[in-house]
Structure formats: C-alpha cells, structure tokens
Amino acid sequence: MAVRSILAVLFGLSLVGCAQPALRSPEAPRRIISLDYCADQYVLRFADRGDILALSPGADEHFSYMRAAARGLPQIRPRTADVLALKPDLVVRSYGGDPNITAFMERAGVPVVQIGFPQTIEQVREEVARVGAELGQADTARRVIADMDKRLGALAAKAGDRPQALYMTPAGVTTGSESLVHELMTAAGLANFQTRSGWNQLPLERLAYERPDLIVAAFFESTSNHVDSWSAARHPVAQAQLRELPVATVEGAWTSCGGWFLVEAIETMSRQARGVS
C-alpha cells in the first residue's frame, strides 16, 4: 500500500508539472529575423533571445544601442533568398533590404513588421507599444513606456531657464524645428539656436557673430560620419564653438533610431543645460 501511495503521489506531481503554463504567449513569434540595426533594437528588447534567428550586420556596432545584447547572435545580410532560406516566422525591418523585400516575404507567407520613423516623442511611444505587441510583449512595452515617461517627468520638474543650444554633427549638419532632435532638445530644457526648420548645414555666417550657450555634439565618436574635408564642422568658426563652449556629447546610438533609448540623449542634454542656465 505504501509503495502504491508513493507512486500515486509521483504520478500526480508529474501531471501538475505538465500542466504548468508556458512562460511565453503561444501567439508570440518563435523564429525572428531583423533586417537592419533600427529593427535590431526592437527585436533585442522585445523578443526572447532563443527566438532570434538572425540580426543585421550592424547589430553589435557602436551605433547600435542594444549592441551588448546582440553579441553572439547570428547575423544575416538583408537579401531575400538568404532570409527565406532560414524559414523565419516573422521578419522585422525599418529600412533593411531592397524596396520589394516586404512583398517577397508576404508572398512567401512570412509576415513583416514594419518599423516607422517617428518624428515626435509621442510617436516613439506609439511605435514602442505597437511593435512590442506584435512581438508578443505588450506588457513589457507598456513598462518600457512608463519608465521613459517617468524619466521625462523628472526632467520636466527640474526645468528652469532655457539656454540656447546648437546641434552639430561631424558632417556639418544641424537641425531646427520639425525634427525629432529638436523635440528632444526641447524636452531637455534647451532652446534651439538654429532658426531654420528641418535639416540644414551649420549656420557658419551667423556663428561668426552670435554664439549659442552650448553645443550638442552627436556622432562624433563615429569614424564613418566624417564626410570630407569640406564638412562645415571642420570650418574654424565651428571648431571654435567646440573648443570654447560647453559641449553635451550625445552618442549616435541614442538618436540614430526612434526608440525608448532617446531618453538617454535627453537626460545628457538636460544635465548640461542645468550647468549653463
């Protein structure tokens, strides 16, 4: 009787173990390929590592925010034949692959999640929520957004005077209103020195007579973003600003794609803004 009782208990325990729910949603995709480093960020954040078939060749480069998480994972070039050969359940892309790759994937029965190009912080929130849900991690996406909003709220509470800042890249490019970078500068408590909307060359003539309070320097850690010796950033007027003014150094990985990690750039700019206001 005692032996049969022990066996009955063990059998019951085995049934309980088999009945435990899976940790992941059964609807979540299991074989995922990412086609470019903007898509890599979302896949690395919202997909389980074991579900990632391959990432783009830029996934572990310095301009990739999630580069540490990408190490050790396979990489693939965004060629249709190569991607289909791996038989993915889902492809995620922002700009990767040729213009017709989405149509090819869908004709082959492979769904594609297209990541957009948000131009406002609100659009970043929407993109995080949408893509996180499509990767089966809606709850995680909501937590990521909540953390981002908490950090932005803390910065808003510290806001004071708005020093003027000029955004500068090694290619000699800056931006005014109607850009995501402009919105990030505003969220950081800065006023944009550049008065022309959109993306433009540095206003060298104006800089010869007027100065901002600080420079927001982005992508200067890159070795591939220095266009040529004719870049406006190499002009003596621009170089003087970099030498003589306070500089908020913003990593390219924080701003090269529209994602939750933009808050890192905002926090860095905000700290420098408080230092000069």
Image (tube, rainbow, N blue to C red):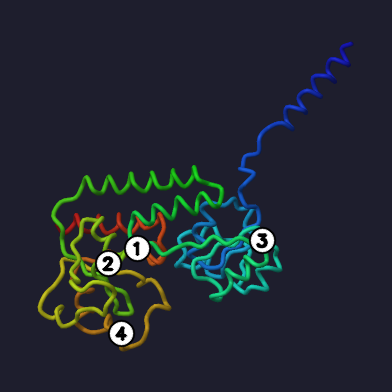
Residues under numbered marks 1 and 4 in contact, where contact means CB atoms less than 8 Å apart: no
Q: Is residue 2 left or right of residue 229?
A: right
Residues under numbered marks 3 and 2 in contact, where contact means CB atoms less than 8 Å apart: no
Task: Name the kind of residue labelled 3 in the image.
Answer: Pro
Task: Name the kind of residue labelled 2 in the image.
Answer: Glu
- Residue at far left of view: 209
| Mark sitting earlier along the chain (4/2) | 2
Residue 142 image offset from top left, x and y in percent: 44, 44
The residue pinned by badge 3 equals 88
Q: Nearer the viewer, residue 34 or 214?
A: 34
Distance of label 3 from label 2 (alpha carbons): 37 Å
| Mark sitting earlier along the chain (3/2) | 3
Which residue is painted at 13% across and 81% down in the image? Answer: 208
The residue pinned by badge 1 equals 119
Under circle 2, the secondary element is loop
The residue pinned by badge 4 equals 231
Residue 100 image offset from top left, x and y in percent: 57, 74
- Residue at far top of view: 1
| Mark sitting earlier along the chain (4/3) | 3
